[in-house]
Image (spheres, coloured by chain):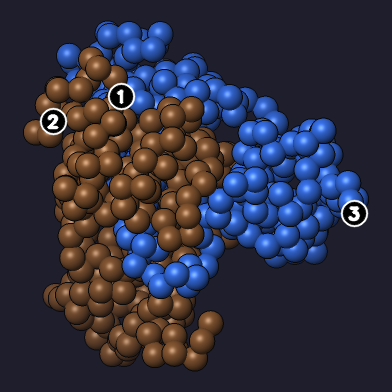
Chain colours: A blue, B brown
Amino acid sequence: VGAGHFSEPEARLSRATAQRLSLYLRCLGSGARNGGTVSSVDLARAVGVSAAQVRRDLAALGHLGRRGVGYDAAGLATAIRRTLGIDRPWRAVLVGVGNLARALLRYRGFRDQGFLIVGLFDNDPAKVGQTVEGLLVEPTSTIPARVPALRAELGVLTVPSESAQALADALTAAGVRGLLNFAPVLLRTPATVRVVTVDLAIQLEQLAFLVQLPDGQAEGVERPPAGR
Amino acid sequence: VGAGHFSEPEARLSRATAQRLSLYLRCLGSGARNGGTVSSVDLARAVGVSAAQVRRDLAALGHLGRRGVGYDAAGLATAIRRTLGIDRPWRAVLVGVGNLARALLRYRGFRDQGFLIVGLFDNDPAKVGQTVEGLLVEPTSTIPARVPALRAELGVLTVPSESAQALADALTAAGVRGLLNFAPVLLRTPATVRVVTVDLAIQLEQLAFLVQLPDGQAEGVERPPAGR
């Protein structure tokens, strides 16, 4: 890492820090606000980390809370959105129009956070031509032309494991820069294309792991928010 | 943490380590095997961590690879399953029978990893009485009696945010010990009930964060497996 990178602190955020920022942002938007301010203790309780961790994370964004007052919630939300790169909309296409895709299309959280699904693709002739949540399902063979035309930067893959790599390759060739992958496979992509895999069986495994831990042994477990 | 805990090394695993173990397990089951053995380098490449990290994680389970030979894949998988607590089946109920629930019910990964969905609940009279993937949809009002009868230890919540807390409370009162929550809210539960929240908007936010990083700046990013 060259010295030049130190002039852009947000570029050096670890993925773990970025995940905590997402969680802080969710709290800021979901009523943890109190007269426009929020304390590090509130955020810490809601997210399940220490208040010192919250203060370190937010100081790295240039936000220092005022003792006894806390952070300005709106200013903090803006800073987090800028750091995460979600202070502008992101256009995404969705490939594989099954039950999971329909659930994602109805999920308000995506649009609320600025993620716009602008195209749907499937290779099943019975699905092509259908309209789902206001979007026409197009054949996957049209990905090379349609993804650039739709100005989509992200792809969401809700296809079976067997098809995931070929469709990841098609999206990559069409210029997509990031893939949200729901197939339980590790995708191969060029280093310039980022992948986040949501492996739902792994989430259940992690839950089983936490459940069988002795009480008080779980590190990094979600904690109930304040006010219970 | 009392000294007694040190006799059970797996009880002191961090959540981050547990997540890496889940990923190693996925590789062991998906063809990374080579004549029954797998190397730390193979696992490291597939999961996106250093080989030294793999060796540390597996040494903590009591598994030392043999130089030039690697690890016995089957033995390693057994040890990881035991450590994560998934060397036995887990029974779960699913609450909220919408598109996401239907996708989860068809998802082979759950059953393959020993997670059995044994009951379905919904509060929509139009859905109660339907059979979905071979299971009868029962009214949520029957959760107190049915969850113990079904011997379910885990609950999967695929309900809107507004209903999530009340149904989490009902499942908790019925004896469930862990909740996999898909609603974008932080649930309040007693300390004895663990919660893993899958917030899909957060996954997209993390992807956007990774995409806007300069090349080579992404720490902890998924890497392509070996053999590309």
* Callout 3 secondary element: loop
Amino acid at pointer 3? Arg
The mark nearer the N terminus, 2 or 1, is 1
Residue A165 image label: none
Which residue is labeled 2 in the image?
B136
Q: Residue furthest left?
A: B134
Amino acid at pointer 2? Leu
* Callout 1 secondary element: loop
Residue that appears at 53% across and 43% down: B186
Classify A129 as above or below B192: above
Which residue is labeled 1 in the image?
B123
Which image quadrant for residue A60? bottom right
Which residue is labeled 3 in the image?
A67
- Left or right: residue A160 versus residue B214 is left
* Callout 2 secondary element: strand
Judging depth in this view, the residue of A11 and A80 nearest the camera is A80
Expressed as whole percent of the image width and height from the top left, the position of residue A5 reads 76, 57
Residue that appears at 31% across and 74% down: B83
Parent chain of label 1: B
Discs 3, 1: same chain = no
Expressed as whole percent of the image width and height from the top left, the position of residue A62 reads 85, 50
Q: Closer to the camera: disc 3 or disc 1? A: 1
Which image quadrant for residue B77? bottom left
Residue that appears at 16% across and 47% down: B150
Amino acid at pointer 1? Asn
